[in-house]
Amino acid sequence: MVGIVSYGTYIPVYRIKAEEIARIWGEDGEVISRGLGIKQKSVPALDEDTATIAVEAAREAVSRAKIDPSEVDAVYVGSESHPYAVKPTATVVGEAVGVGNYYFAADLEFACKAGTAGMQICIAMARADMIRYGLAIGADTSQGAPGDPLEYSASAGGAAFLIGRKNVIAEVEATTSFTSDTPDFWRREGQPYPKHGGRFTGQPAYFRHITSAAKKILEETGLKPSDFAYAVFHQPNGKFPTRVAKMLGFSKEQISPGLVVPYIGNTYSGSSLLGLAATLDVVKPDERILLVSFGSGAGSDAFVIRATDSIESFEREPKVLEKIERGIYVDYGMYVKLRRKIKMA
Amino acid sequence: MLPRFWRKIKHRYNLIATKCENCGTYYYPPRNLCPKCRRKSRIVEVKLSGKGEVLSYSVVHEAPENMKDQKPYVVAMIKLDEGPVITSQLVCDCKEVRRGMRVKAAFRRCGEEGDAGIIYYCTKFVPE
Amino acid sequence: MRRVAVIGVGQSKFGELWDASFRDIVLSAGIEAIEDAGLEGREIEALYVGNMSGGRFLSQEHIAALIADYAGLAELHIPCTRVEGADASGGLALRQAYLAVASGLHDIVIAAGAEKVTDIVDKAMEILASGVDREWEVFNGATLASLFAMMARLHMDMYGTRAEDLAMVSVKNHRNAVKNPKAQFRREISIDVALNSPYVAEPLRMFDCAPISDGAAAVILASEEVARKYTDTPVFISASSQATDYIALSSRKDFTRMDAVVFAAREAYRKAGIGARDIDVAEVHDSFTIAEIMAYEDLGFAEKGKGAELIREGVTEIDGDLPVNTSGGLKACGHAAGATGIRQAVEITLQLRGDAGERQVDAERGLALNIGGTGATAVVTIFSR
C-alpha cells in the first residue's frame, strides 16, 4: 500500500484583513471580502520565505512520522516563489531535515499545483520501490501586485507530505491529471508580480480543469460523491471551491473542514495541500477524501485518498485549524515592510 | 563569505554542537578543542534539542546595513538546555521578550548578499 | 628588565576630521610627541603602531611601513610594526614598545595608534563589530552595542544599576571633554538629554555609546637612563599587563564581568607593587557607559555589583577621589579604535606631569584600561611619577 505516512504544515503568524487592504485602495472591504470569500490572509515575516516554510512543514512531517530522516530518499518542493530562480529549494530542505546526501531532489513549478505534482512523483517512486519515503512539499510566499485583486488573496504557507509504503495513515487509491495549455495566469522571468487573465481564470481555467480531473478519477474508480466523507478543491478564493463542489455534486459539509482560504488566503502551492492537511486532521479510518488541485497554465491533479486505521494513533497536534487561529494582525504599512515592498537604500 | 557559510551549514541549520566526551561539556559554536581538557579532548558532534531560555537580550534599533529592514529586532543570549549559550536573533514582539523566557529553534533567513547574491539560512529562536 | 619612561606625548584632534587623511593625522600626533620629548626623529630606534582595521577602513594594509614613510623614518630603515587587537590595538602597541625598551633591545621607541574611519561613510559600525565573533555573533544579528546592552541588562537586573547611572557616566565624560581641546564633543549634556536620546540597542541609548572617530596619538618611550637626559618629568610605566578571554561573549562564565580585565589588573597591581586604592587617576575604556561601570568593578575600584555607587557618589568625577576619564573618555574625547589605547596613555602622562591644563587633577599614579571588542583583549598599564 502506497500513501501518506505523515504530514506537516506551516503558516506564518502574521495576518492582514481584506478590509485593511481595501482601506488603502479606496475599495469597500466588506463587499470584496464577501465577493472573494476571503476575510484575511497570512503574511510571511521578513526572514521567512518558501524555503523556511518548506523546512518547517517538512520537519513537522518527519518528526510526526517518528522515522529516521535518513530514510527519506526524495525531496520535491513545489512553489511559484522559490527564493532563487536558479538553485533548488529542495536542497535547503534536504539539508535542514537531515536526509543525508543520497536522495532524489528537484524543485517543481506549476503555479498552484506544483505541490500535488510532487506528490504524484513520490507516489510513483514509492510504487516503483525507488524510495523508502519521499517528501512532497507545496509552499509559497506568493505576491499580488499592489492594488491588484490578487493582493487580497496571495498569501504564504505550506504543507509537506511524507509518502511511502510503511505505516501509511492514508492510502492514495488513485491519482490522475488533466492538463492543457491555458494561459490564465503567469509571471515572466524577472518580473516581481504575476499577471492574470481576469475573468478568463474562471470557466476555461479553474472550473474546466478541476471538473475534468474530478470526473475522470470518479469514472476510473467507479466512485461517486457520496462515497467521500470529504473533498478538497484548490482554493484561490472562497467562492471557486464552493461553486465547483456544487457543480460536481459535493456538499458544503464535505468541503468545509478543508476550506482554509477564508482565514489565510491563497497559499498557492500550499493551498490545496493545507486543505488536505486540515481534512486529515479530522478524518476517521476508512473515510475517503477527494483532493483536486489546480495550477494555472493549466492543470489539475486529482487524488482518491482513504484513511487507514493508523490515522487514529497518528500525532495530529497541533492541528491546522489551531495554526490558522494563531494570528497577529498587521496594518498595511507593516505589510508593505514585511513583504519587502519598501525599497531600502 | 560563501565557502565560510557553506562549511558550517549543518551547524547553522540543525544546531549541531560539539561535545567533549572527556568532560561532558557541550559547545556551540562548535569547537575542535575542548578548552577544559585541551589535548585530552574527545570531541564528537551532537544535535542539540533547540530548546532553551533567554539569559539576556537587547532590542536592536541601530542595525547593520544588511539588517536594516528588520529593525527593531531582538537579539538574545539563549542558554540551551544542554548547556551552551548561543547569541541569536529571537523572533518575537519586542515588548514580549523577557529574561527566563522559554524559546525553541526555528528555521529562518538570516541575511543575503544583496539582491543578486546568496541567501543565508540559519537557526533563530521563537517563543516556545 | 629596565624601568621604562614616557618622555613625550602627542595627539591629533579626535573627531570627524574631513580635511585630514590618515597620513596627516598620524604625522601630527607623531611630530607633537617628538617635539614634546625634545628629540631628533633620527634617535628613534623602532615604531609600534596600533591600528584596528586599515584594511577595511582604508583598503590599506602595511600600515606601519606607510606611517614610517610619511613620518620620515623610511630613510632610517628602523623596524616598524603594526599591532592589532581590535580597539585594544593601541594598548597592545604601547605594551610592545614597553617590552622592547624594558628588555634592553631598544633605548627609544615610539608607540603610536591611529584610525581613520570617516573615509567610509556607511560601514564604520559594521567594521568596528569585527572585533567580536563575526561568524557566531555578528552573523546571528548581534551588533557591538547589543552585546554591551545584554551585559548592561544583566548588570541592571542583578545589581540594581540604573539607566540614570549609565547616563551619569556619559554626562561626566562630556563635562570633562569641555576642558580637553583635543576632544570630539566639547559640550556638556544634561542627564535628561542622555536619558531621552534614542535607543541604539536597548537598554543602551545614543549617549551610552562612544562615537567612532578619526584620531591618532603617539608616545615616546625610553629607558630610565636615556629618559633622564631628555626630561625632568619622566612618567614611568610601572606595569604593563595584558590578558585574553573568549572572543564571543556567550562563551564566558559571567556576562557582567570581564575576566580579561580582572586578570590584567591583578597582574598589573602585583607588578607595580600597589593596590587599586593607590590609583589616583584612570582612563578606562567606556566604549559604552556600562563598560565604565564594569571597569570600576573589574579594576577593583568598587566591589562587584557596586560600580554604579562610584558614579552616584561622585567619586570618579574630576574633583572626586578617583577621577576617571578626565580626557572625556571614549564617549566624549572620541573613540578612534586603534588610537584609543595610546590616547589614554597621553592623558595619564599629561596628568602625572601636571600638564593637563584646565582638567588637571592631583595624581601620582595613574592607570589606563584599553579593551578590544567586548573584552576578549584587555591591556592595563600603570603609570607613576
Image: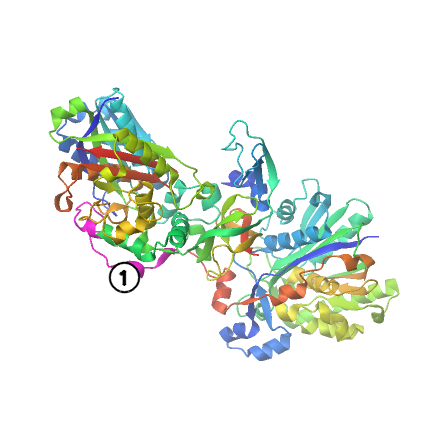
A29 with respect to C27 (left or right): right
Q: Chain of mark 1?
A: C
**Residue A135 lies in the magenta stretch:** no
| Residue sitting farthest toward the left | C232
Instruction: Identify the residue at image location x=54%, y=53%.
Output: B125
Tell which of C147 and B11 is nearer to you. Answer: C147
* Rendered image quadrant of residue B19: top right
**Depth order, front residue of A236/C381:** C381
Q: Secondary structure at mark 1?
A: helix
Residue C377 location, quadrant: top left
Relative image position of residue B115 (x, y in whole percent): 50, 51
Asked whether C194 falls inside the magenta stretch, the response is: yes
Image position, residue C73 (x, y; %)? 22, 26
Q: Is residue A108 visible?
A: no
- Residue at the spot 18% in from the left edge and 24% down from the top edge: C224
* B90 shown above or below A151: above
Query: Which of C225/C51 is in front?
Result: C225
Q: Quadrant for the C terminus of chain B, please.
A: bottom right
Relative side of C91 to A256, left or right: left
Residue interval drawn in magenta: C175-201
- As shown in the figure, which amino acid type bears the numbered disc 1? Asp
Q: Give the x, y percent position of residue A96.
A: 62, 47
Side of C157 where A158 appears, left or right: right
Q: Which residue is mark 1?
A: C192
Q: Residue furthest right?
A: A222
**C138 in relation to B100, above or below:** above
Q: Residue furthest top?
A: C105
